[in-house]
Image (tube, rainbow, N blue to C red):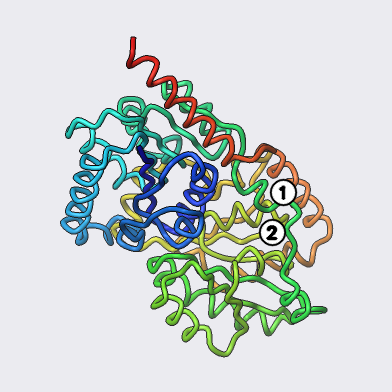
Amino acid sequence: MSVFVSCGEVSGDLYAADLIQELSGEEKIWGMMGPRGVQAGGEATWNYEELKLMGITEVLPAIPRILRLRNRIADEISRRKPSVVVVVDSPDFHFSLVKKLRKNGYRGLTVFLVTPTVWAWRSGRTKLLRDYFDLCLPLFSFEHDFLIARGVRSQWAAHPLVTALEGYAAPEELSRRYRGERVVALMAGSRRYDVKYHLTQLVETATLLRTEGLLPVFSVAPGLSEPLRRELKERVSGFEWWGGEGRGLMAASEAAAGVSGTVAVEAMLLRRFMVVIYNVKGLSWLIARALVRIPYISIPNYLTDGPVYPELLKNEARPARIVGELQAYLDDPARKKEIDRRLEAARDAMGSVRAASFWARAILEAKIKAKVETKR
C-alpha cells in the first residue's frame, strides 16, 4: 500500500515535505508535489507547477486544463489504491478531486492538511470537510476550534514553522555581507500573480528606502520556478537581492515588507516587523469584497490582543505609505517595544511540539481506527 500526497504551491510543498519525511519510513509516498516533497522522499508523479494559480479571474481560463489534471490524478489513484489520500491547501482543486474520488468508489482514508479558511469566507465548505474528509489538520488553534464546533473531525497541536524556525539565525554569508547596514527585506511572493501585481510597488519602495538611508534587499527564493526567478532578478537589477531562503533574508533584516501569505507567519516567528501588502485587481477585488467578512488578511493579526502588522490593500499599497509604516516602527522606540511584545504573544499562540510528527501520528492512528471499524 502507499500514501498519495498532493500540493499546489511553494508553501504547500513545504508542509507536504515535512509530512513525507515523517511517513517515508512507513509508506511509499507519491503524488503531486514540488522539489521539497521530492527531496523529503516523495515520488512526484505530477509537478505542482501544474496547479500554481491565484486570483479568481486568473483561474477561469485554466479550468478545462485543471479538470483534465484532476481526472488523470483520480484515475491513477483508483488504479494504485493508496491507503491514504492527503491533500495540502489549494482547496478548490482538492475538494473537486476528493469528491471525484468518492464518486469513483475510493474508500481509503482522506486527510486535508492545511484546511481552507472557512472561518474567513465560504463557510459553506465546512460541510465538504465534514462529508468528504476523515481527518482535518489545520495550522492554527483558532481554526481547529472553529472546525470542531461545526462537527468536522479536526486535530491540532502546533504550527510546523514553530520548530522549523526555533533558534533560526541569518546565514553567515548574509550577516557578513550586511554587517552594519539597516536592511529591509522585500518579499515579492512566490507566485506569478504576486510578482505581476506587487513588484512594481516594491521596486518603487526600494528606491524610497535608499533615500532614507535604509538598504532594501529583494528575496528571490529558490522555490520559485526558474522562469519566474529569471524575471524577478531582471526586474530588481540595480538593487541588492538574495537567492537563498526568504526566511534567511528576514532574519538578517530589521523589518520587512511584502505580499500577504506564509511569509508573514515566518516574519512573526522570527520576531520581525512586516508591512503586509495585497494588490487584488479588478473583478477579483469586487468578488473578494463581497465574500470575505474578516477584519484582517494576515494571520499574525489574529493571534494577539490587537493587529501587529499594518495591512495595505489595493490602492493603499503605495510606496510612500509602505515606507512610512516601516519608519513608524523603526524610528519610534515606544511603538517598536509594543509591536515586539505583540509579536512574542503571537508566537506563543503557535504551539510548541513538532507539528509534522503530530500529523503523521494522527494519520496513522486514523488509518488503524478505520481498519478496525471496517472489520466490524
- Find residue 253 and name its label: none
Give amino acid for label 1.
Answer: Leu
Q: x and y percent of residue 158 in the render?
A: 62, 37
Say the numbered circle drawn on residue 273: 2
Kindly check if marks 2 and 1 are in contact, taking CB atoms under 8 A apart as contact. Answer: yes
Q: Position of residue 272 (x, y in %)?
A: 70, 59
Badge 1: how crowded within 10 Å, few (<14), some, or many (20+)?
Answer: many
Residue designated by label 1: 343
Residue at the (57%, 90%) spot, across then down: 238
- Label 2 packing within 10 angstroms: few (<14), some (14-19), many (20+): many
- Residue 277, given in percent of the width and then of the height, sits at 52, 62
Mark 2 element type: strand
- The structure residue drawn at horizontal position 60% and vertical position 85%, both measured from the top left corner, is 239
Question: Measured from the top left, where is residue 338 in percent x and y?
Answer: 78, 50
Q: Does residue 365 show up?
A: yes
Q: Find the distance from the CA under tag 2 to the CA under tag 1.
A: 8 Å
Mark earlier in primary sequence (2, 1):
2
Q: Report the number of numbered marks.
A: 2
Looking at the rendered image, the quarter that the C terminus falls into is top left
Q: Amino acid at mark 2?
A: Phe
Q: Residue furthest bottom?
A: 238
